[in-house]
Amino acid sequence: MKTASALLLGAVALTVLPSATASAATNPDNSDSYAYSHPCSTEQLSVQVSGWNAAPSQRLIEVRNLGANSCGLSYFPLVHLGDSHSADQSRNVKPLVPGGLGGPPAYALHAGQTAYAVVDLNPTGATTGTVPGIDEMNVLADGDHMPNADTLNFPLEAGTRVLNPKLGLYRDNIGDAIDSVKDADTPQS
C-alpha cells in the first residue's frame, strides 16, 4: 500500500476554477461523456485528506484530476478505518454509504477539477463505546476500477473517536459533500 500524509487544516479554503463546460468546448476529451467511458487512473489523480476545527469528527477527501482529460470516478471513494500496526485488516471499520445508487456512469471529474467527499468518523459525537485502536484512514479514490494496491493511508490523530462512521458522495463543492453524508444508510459491500 502507498503511504501519504494527512493535512490538518484549521479552516477550509474554497477554490474557484473555470467551468467544466467551457473546458469541454475546447477539449472534447474533457467532457462528461468521455469521463464515463474512461475511468480515472491513479497516476492522474492527487488525493488529500484533511480535517477542520469546526467539525472535528469529519474528514474531507479531495481528489484532483491532474490530467489533461476528464475521467470517471465511482460515486464515492472506498474508505476503511483501521489499526496501522495490525497485519490483519479484516476488522477495519467501513463507513455507511448512501444507498439506492444506480450503476455507472457515476462521477465525471474534469481536467483540473477537484471532487470532494466527506466522512464523519463519529456522527453522534459519542465519547464512550467508540472503536478502540483506530489510527488510520485508508482511501481508494475509485473502488470500482482501481486495484487495492492503489489505496493510500492517512494517519488519524491520537484519540480520534470512531463510532458508526458515515461517508458521503463525491460532489463538486464541500457544502454538498457534507450534505450527502446525511444519506449514508447502507453498509459498503
Image (cartoon, grey):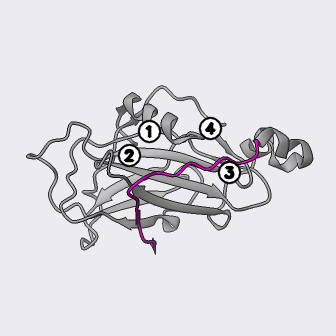
Q: Which of the two labelled residues, at mark 3 and mark 2, occupies the earlier sequence position?
A: 3
Quadrant in which residue 83 is drawn: bottom left
Mark 2 neighbour class, 10 Å CA radius: few under 14, some 14 to 19, many 20 or more? many
Residue under circle 1? 168
Three-letter amino acid code at disc 1?
Gly
Q: Which residues are magenta?
A: 1-19
Residue under circle 2? 119
Mark 3 neighbour class, 10 Å CA radius: few under 14, some 14 to 19, many 20 or more? many
Q: In the image, is residue 51 above or below residue 6?
A: above
Q: Position of residue 91 (x, y in %)?
A: 24, 57
Three-letter amino acid code at disc 2?
Val
**For the residues marked 4 and 3, what is the alpha-carbon distance in whole angstroms?**
16 Å
| Count of numbered marks | 4
- Helix, strand or loop at label 2? It is strand
Q: Main secondary structure of the magenta part?
A: loop
Q: Is residue 95 magenta?
A: no
**For the residues marked 3 and 2, what is the alpha-carbon distance in whole angstroms?**
20 Å
